[in-house]
Amino acid sequence: MTEVATTRRSRLTPEREAELYAAVLDLLREVGYDALTMDAVAARTRSSKATLYRQWGGKAELVVRAVRHGKPGTFDGTDTGSLRGDLHALVVHEDDCTMEQNSALMRGLAMAMHSNPDLRQAFREQLIEPETAAFHRLVRRAVDRGEVRADCPALDFVVHMMAGGFVVRALMEDQPPTQDFLRSYIDAVVLPALGAPTS
Amino acid sequence: MTEVATTRRSRLTPEREAELYAAVLDLLREVGYDALTMDAVAARTRSSKATLYRQWGGKAELVVRAVRHGKPGTFDGTDTGSLRGDLHALVVHEDDCTMEQNSALMRGLAMAMHSNPDLRQAFREQLIEPETAAFHRLVRRAVDRGEVRADCPALDFVVHMMAGGFVVRALMEDQPPTQDFLRSYIDAVVLPALGAPTS
């Protein structure tokens, strides 16, 4: 699947690909997922619909690729030598303004996923699963360094803890999770639950 | 506001009120918030629309009242003498089947809130704020008993922790948060982050 997708996309230059993804994110912010059409993407990016379908297969895959491309560095590129350093590093990739724009975008997509199983599946396969796996490797390194005990029960819930702070802040409090909020949450909740050093 | 609402509703017997709320929840599960009409509620419950509007003011308030009424015991009624006991008690009010039905219902409502500011406001005023306040009182008692230090930084995030496990499980994993899951999450994450006894 990844092999095929890479082959398909290899005909575009990285610059052209980045341009396309940026246009898709702009359109998403303007009209939302349900009203976004491949026609609009084709018009905005001066490409043919045939090209879009050949490269990405469909709207759901194109949208998820665009979101994935727009994300700051992956977990795998982060290795500061401590769990606290790694978790804090994940937060500082974006400034608060981008974070606010993106959390509105992601909220819209979360709503669209409710009624679009293909979007939900693409999101899970292309984003949630790889990110979760990378995040587990990051935590695994903390275990290997002796910062977290291998049998710590909170290890089963690292994703729930991290995503929980983010999601609850955005959904229930109607506030974007700022860097300050996320850093405090990491120090007050995630590290203590894991029994890891908090400073 | 509460005064007025109580006066308005005092004309109904508790049995009749419960019957109305149950019908609203049934309709919500059948057609969702956006397609639910006061006409349908009136027809299903053999009441007049005028009565419904006089008693509840509108669809958003009626729906939130129905959800609130259908919830298991409030936090305020829970006092087992330990934080762990209290948190576990919050989980056992519902069986897993009800929990699965309700989490589907709540997921639908969360989506509807995205595009209905009046529903969002009613939800916040009638459910989130009172529950959060009651939850804080429950945690406060743990501080007074000496189970949690008064300056524990995780105290600012108790709601994020609790709701996070629930929401992430439902949204990202497409699985209802079972009692087993929530109990493990409380023991592995919430209590250790608060530095409270885990057994």
Image (cartoon, coloured by chain):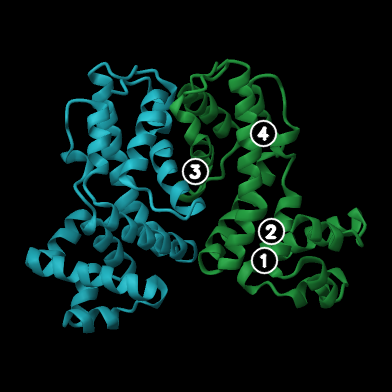
Chain colours: A cyan, B green
Q: Amino acid at mark 4?
A: Leu
Q: Residue at x 81, y 76 (%)?
A: B49
- Image spot of residue A110 (x, y percent): 43, 59
Instruction: Tell which of A125 and B49 is nearer to you.
Output: B49
Q: Are marks 3 and 4 in contact (CB under 8 Å)?
A: no
Q: CA distance from mark 4 to mark 2?
A: 20 Å
Residue B169 numbered mark, or none: 3
Q: CA distance from mark 2 to mark 3?
A: 23 Å
Q: Nearest to the eye among marks 4 and 2: give it.
A: 2
Chain of the residue displaying label 1: B
Name the N-terminal-most of marks 4 and 2: 2
Q: Nearest to the eye among marks 3 and 4: give it.
A: 4
Q: Secondary structure at mark 4?
A: helix
Q: Residue at x 20, y 68 (%)?
A: A22
Instruction: Read off the residue under disc 1.
Output: B60
Name the N-terminal-most of marks 4 and 1: 1
Chain of the residue displaying label 4: B
Instruction: Tell which of B77 and B6 is nearer to you.
Output: B6
Instruction: Read off the residue under disc 2.
Output: B64
